[in-house]
């Protein structure tokens, strides 16, 4: 599996819907894709926060946290445990992606445009 293939399944991976050995193997040796996964997880977390607020308002600090690329090392196991704990939240946030949060998603796409590799498969 290469980075382009990984990015295609990343949203599903973050929702724990796609956990192939190939994907896990790629993440274990690709820091770029791990960073992308963390950003996606941050976005999903931010969206569930947003859903609890008035529609159309971006929560304070959301964009900042999305733009910031975390430097800490995160193992696949830690991510899996985190996702397992938050599975419901992510499922809800994924539904919210389609509706309330178009503006925020657009902002994320703009922010990551410079990297040239980002591609969100949303909808
Ligand atoms: Zn990669």
Image (cartoon, grey):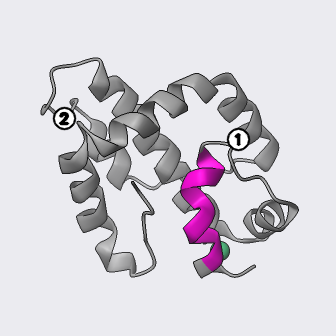
Measured from the top left, where is residue 72 in percent x and y? 61, 48
Residue at 56%, 69% in the rendered image: 8
Measured from the top left, where is residue 114 in percent x and y? 31, 78
Circle nearer the N terminus (1, 2): 2
Where residue 118 sits, quadrant-wise, is bottom left
Ligand 1, image quadrant it occupies: bottom right
- The answer to whether residue 30 shows anywhere in this view is yes
In the figure, 112 relative to 114: above or below?
Answer: above
Q: Which residue is mark 2?
A: 58
Label annotation for residue 27: none
Region rendered in magenta: 5-14
Q: Quadrant of the C terminus?
A: bottom left
Q: CA distance from mark 1 to mark 2?
A: 25 Å
How many C-alpha atoms fall within 10 Å of the one at disc 2: few (<14), some, or many (≥20)?
some
Measured from the top left, where is residue 87 in percent x and y? 62, 28
Measured from the top left, where is residue 10 in percent x and y? 59, 59
Residue at 28%, 45% in the rendered image: 64
118 horizontally vs 32: left or right: left
Q: Which residue is mark 1?
A: 79
């Amino acid at each position: 599996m290469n980075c382009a293939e990984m990015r295609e399944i990343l949203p599903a991976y973050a929702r724990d819907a796609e956990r192939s050995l190939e994907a896990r193997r790629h993440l274990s040796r690709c820091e770029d894709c791990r960073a992308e996964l963390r950003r996606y997880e941050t976005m999903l977390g931010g969206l569930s926060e947003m859903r609890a607020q008035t529609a159309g308002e971006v929560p304070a600090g959301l964009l900042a946290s999305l733009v910031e690329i975390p430097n800490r090392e995160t193992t696949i196991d830690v991510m899996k445990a985190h996702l397992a704990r938050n599975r419901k939240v992510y499922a809800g946030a994924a539904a919210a992606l389609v509706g309330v949060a178009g503006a925020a998603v657009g902002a994320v796409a703009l922010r990551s445009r410079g990297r040239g590799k980002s591609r969100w498969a949303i909808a």
